Image (cartoon, rainbow, N blue to C red):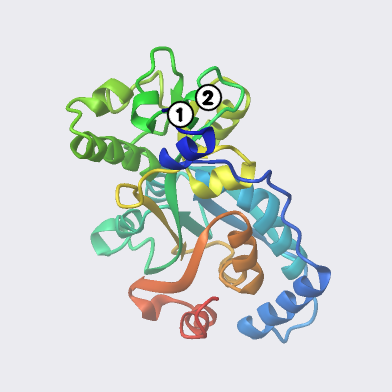
Amino acid sequence: MSLPLAQRARRFGFTRPAPARPAQVPRRTLGAAAALLGALLGATAPARAGTDVNVLYAGSLVTLMEQAIGPAFDQASGDRFRGYAGGSQLLANEIAARLRRADVFISAAPAINARLMGRRKGRWIGAYLTFARSPLVIGYNPQSRFAPLWRSRPWYQVLQEPGLRLGRTDPKLDPKGALTVRLLRRAAIRYHLPGLAHRVLGGAENPAQVLPEETLLGRLQSGQLDAGFFYSTETAAAGIPTVRLPRDLTPQALYTVALVRDAPHRRAGVAFIAFLLGPVGRQLMRAQGLRVFAPVASGDERTLPTPLRRLLHGSPPR
């Protein structure tokens, strides 16, 4: 006898998040955040003109940064957030090649920061803080002709359906792309399906699937894709239905933030990181599906500005 639809959904990991609402922070909270930010930075100087802060950040955080963190930081600090999204490895390459000048770098994989540390690698980063995680999920377009299949069949079978248009990121330029390949290889072993990764993905850099991280979500929403691999924070923020994968099989993004060496707007960069890891920043990140935890320092902690060391050794985020 066939199972009811709801039971089949639970069996195969189907979930559908509630529609996303724009993140809103009460003015009183922002006022308190501004006061706390000033205290952390030791601000005693008279009013000044705002400064741009250039933030290179992982493309999976576009909605969070452009619609929540950036505007809230501008309002609380008087400085101006200027963000640029892209694959974490691509952004790191651009920093190292001096193609982009940044104050702050936010990546989705700690290992990428390590490639910017040390004398031989230019010492672009002295230390970085790991502060949040987000698991990999499959997001799909609810209008796709394949949408009903996610509710009734195992995810790895649906991915092999002829004609399904799948999107993912470049494993050489973005951690999410590398995690996607890793997931399919693990699944091939778990479910005794040799060749699963090749059947689903084609080549690792299959041009029919690989897209820039910052455009992947829009392609899915516009109907150009039937499904794609995303982090849960992306799908939660956009209200996209998802297929959650087995916990012990699922890789996760680990988000990190660092002040870049010779930051042209160092004070504003420090202020931005303090805001991101402060009460309002944590609130906004959680509202968009990130699993936030007490920041952990890696590298030479002595290179961290005093305000960031204070945050690091303060009370853990709740």
Q: Residue type at mark 1?
A: Ser
Quarter of the image where the N terminus is located: top left
Residue 182, above or below 261: above
Q: Which residue is mark 2?
A: 148
Quarter of the image where the C terminus is located: bottom right
Are dots 1 and 2 in contact, CB under 8 Å? yes
Q: Which residue is mark 1?
A: 152
**Disc 1 to disc 2, how far (Cα)?**
7 Å
Residue 31, above or below 222: below
135 or 247: nearer the viewer: 247
Q: Position of residue 191 (x, y in %)?
A: 23, 35
Q: Residue type at mark 2?
A: Pro
Whether residue 237 is visible here, answered yes or no, is: yes
At x 30% / y 59%, what residue is drawn?
114
Q: Residues within 10 Å of mark 1 (few under 14, many from 20)?
A: many
Q: Secondary structure at mark 2?
A: helix
Q: Position of residue 220 (x, y in %)?
A: 56, 28
Q: Position of residue 123 (x, y in %)?
A: 33, 63
At x 64% / y 66%, what residue is drawn?
283
At x 32% / y 40%, what residue is drawn?
178
- In the displayed structure image, the side of residue 300 where residue 294 appears, left or right: right
At x 71% / y 75%, what residue is drawn?
33
Whether residue 58 is visible here, answered yes or no, is: no
